[in-house]
Amino acid sequence: MGGAPIRVRPNKSTDAAAAERLYTDFEADIRWMQRRIRVEYEKLPAAVQSVAWHYLAKRVRVLPDPNRTVVIPTHPLSPQPIPYLAFWFARDFGVKEAKVRRLLALAMAYVCAGSSPRDDLVDGVVFAAAEQNYVARWLWELYFDTLKELFPAESAIWYLVAKCEADWSRSDRVVLFSEKVAAAKPLSRAFLRETSGYLAALITPTLAGVALLKKRPGAVSSIERFCQTYCMGWRILDDLRDWDEDRVKTRGCRSSVLALLRLRAKIPVGEPLPRELAVSLFADAKVTGEIYGAMTKLFRAARREAERLGAATVVQYIDLQMEGHRMEVAQMAAERKKFQESLKRLLEAEAMAQPR
């Protein structure tokens, strides 16, 4: 992820330990997934393996990257919902079979990894177009094949997969070419619903599949609402973390944070947003308060759906994530106060030094 305005250093606290267990409880499952993915990866033509490795190890991070020493997130400020949401929902819905929860998580990993090359191509990040297209289609096929191991042909899951694929494509079209979305307020539900639609489309079928496997079809609607509101909140968080990277891309139309900064600075889309100006805007408590306030409101809405579903692990995850955000906001406030006090002392010293 890209740079945030301020980063809080992790402390080994109770919350940090609880956050760590959300991931370490599934280390054996992750290793199983990695072995399975590597088998498929090694079947790829040599010409596309490096591109596939880029998306599997560096973007979605479902394969271990030897250049990264930390594999498991250890703090609420570094959440990793993919593929762990599948594990958490499976646990909360009472899925006992290890292979079932592993296949659910594997399906989520494949479809999310497969979205990355497609998104890059849409955003104009083209470094190997033919290989990127190949990898996107390969991962989508693996996603489909993994679901087939869990669900029969007559399952309602296939309707959800088709619907979400259509929603994903629609989201791309609307974001790229809709004047209505471009004119919407950056942190409004209208803007966030459209720009995060593809994210919700990626995770909804797998999580709804948990409910279908446990014979709870009535829970699917609530899961869809959870995915929509959670992904709207995650859209803001991801945009906040990646604002500097997104700032220099040729297309930044999906970034709620950049759109907000441009609006505050009165800089239209298409004109460069200077980094120094963006940093100065992040120093404004009103701007950061608006960003974190909108994000928290959406995560709370997702939390309510998780509560209705009886998904205690998911509720715990969201609580820890929101606590991390409160810590970050508090750290920003402390940094602003420290800067203001230093500036005040400097001005007072200058005033005293003036001849009378």
Image: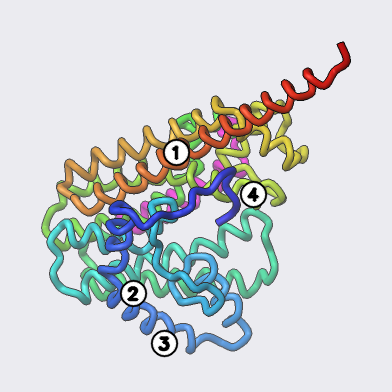
Q: Residue at x 24, y 47 (%)?
A: 315
User: Does 111 appear above or below 66?
Assistant: above
* Quarter location, residue 147: bottom left
Q: The disc labelled 4 sits on which kind of residue?
A: Asp
- Callout 4 environment at 10 Å: few (<14), some (14 to 19), or many (20+)? many
Q: Is residue 17 left or right of residue 187?
A: left
Q: Which residue is mark 2?
A: 30
User: Does 102 appear above or below 237?
Assistant: below
Q: Which mark is residue 246?
A: 4
Q: What kind of secondary structure does the magenta stretch mostly adopt? A: helix
Residues at discs 1 and 2 in contact (Cβ within 8 Å): no
Q: The disc labelled 2 sits on which kind of residue?
A: Ile
- Callout 1 environment at 10 Å: few (<14), some (14 to 19), or many (20+)? many
Q: The disc labelled 1 sits on which kind of residue?
A: Arg
- Residue 160: percent from left, percent from top: 31, 55
Q: Does the image show residue 97?
A: yes
Q: Name the one closer to the observer, 159 or 27.
A: 27
Residues at discs 1 and 3 in contact (Cβ within 8 Å): no
- Magenta stretch: includes residue 179: yes
Q: Sequence-wise, which precedes: disc 2 or disc 4?
A: 2
Q: The disc labelled 3 sits on which kind of residue?
A: Val
Q: Which residue is mark 1?
A: 193
Q: Sequence-wise, which precedes: disc 4 or disc 1?
A: 1
Q: Secondary structure at mark 2?
A: helix
- Residue 264: percent from left, percent from top: 65, 26
State how far apart marks 3 and 4 are (Cα).
34 Å
Q: Name the one closer to the observer, 54 or 13.
A: 13
What segment is highlighted magenta in the picture? Answer: 160-181
